[in-house]
Amino acid sequence: MDRDQLLEQALGLGEEGNWQAAAELLRDHLEDFSEDAAVHCWLGVAEQELGMGGVAYERFKYALSFGTEDPYVLATAGNGIAYFDDPDAEQTLRTASMLGPDIPVTRLMYGAYLAREGFTEKGVEELAAARDLDPDDPQIAYELGVGWALAGNHDRSTDALADAVRLDPEDGWARIVFGLELLEADRFEEGAGELMSGARIREDDVDAQLVAALAAAAVGRDGVAYEMLERARIRASEPDLALLTAVEDRLDAGYEAAREMLEEDLAPDILRTRLRERP
């Protein structure tokens, strides 16, 4: 198996969600490609997906140590080390964008990094360039929405997030963030609908169930509200119990109390946290 065949097969396994098999395949051939940055980089991706963050970080750093000029490797590994606030991430991602200005993923990863580091104007510029290169990529649309949200422009954020949801209707995470941004843009009814839809997709997401419960109660859908509360209760762990009880108290108190908690407390906190999640 040559290098391109190996990477194609590993990527195919990853796209199927079988990251364990992808990692095993790459490890089995690692000796044959011990100085190939791309092989180490993609093994790092597989290990990161398997929850082996520390191992993946070292893998990304090792891939970069070869001095590669492959923009795909630079973008992927640069994004990987950004998870750990590595100071080399910015230069790595900037180099990827400069070496591959016509490759959507390089502009995507650099823009996403800049937006989360507070350089929102430049971040949005990079993300808009990525969208121009590939207007049908839902991840690019999502990250552009995040960039605009971090810049405080909720109208443009909701436009971009609407595209992300249209392009991938089954992405519950994007729907939750879209719903939360709609609340910020004073489009409460639409936001409540997206929060309920997102929570149904992300059944194991306790926070999503709780914001959806409050949203449902606030628009008069009490049956859905208590359904979402029970979904959250089934999946809640010890740290979730205090918040779950607080939400239940608000549901019992009526729609005004539910809306107040949603808009003033829970929704802004969850949105702030989710906007900081790196791609």
Image (cartoon, grey):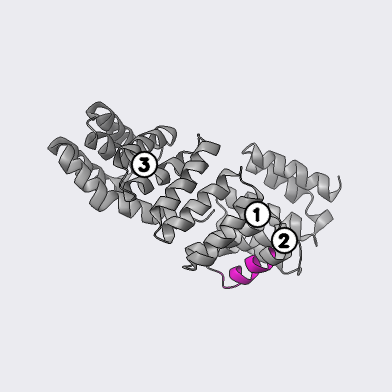
Closer to the chain start, of discs 3 and 2, is 2
Q: Which label was assigned to residue 208?
A: 3
Q: Which residue has dot 2 on it? A: 100
Q: Please say if the residues under marks 2 and 1 sit with CB atoms less than 8 Å apart.
A: yes
Label 3, label 1: how many angstroms apart (C-alpha)? 28 Å
Q: Which quadrant would residue 41 be assigned to in this image? A: bottom right
| Badge nearest the viewer, 3 or 1 | 1
Q: Quadrant of residue 14?
A: top right
Q: Is residue 207 magenta?
A: no
Residue 232 percent coordinates (x, y): 32, 37
Asked if residue 50 can be seen in this view, the reply is: no
Tell me residue 73's x, y (percent): 71, 59
Q: Nearer the viewer, mark 3 or mark 2?
A: 2
Q: Which three-letter amino acid code belongs to the residue tagged 1?
A: Val
Q: Which residue is most to the right?
A: 2
Mark 1 = which residue?
A: 105
Is 274 in front, or is 2? 274
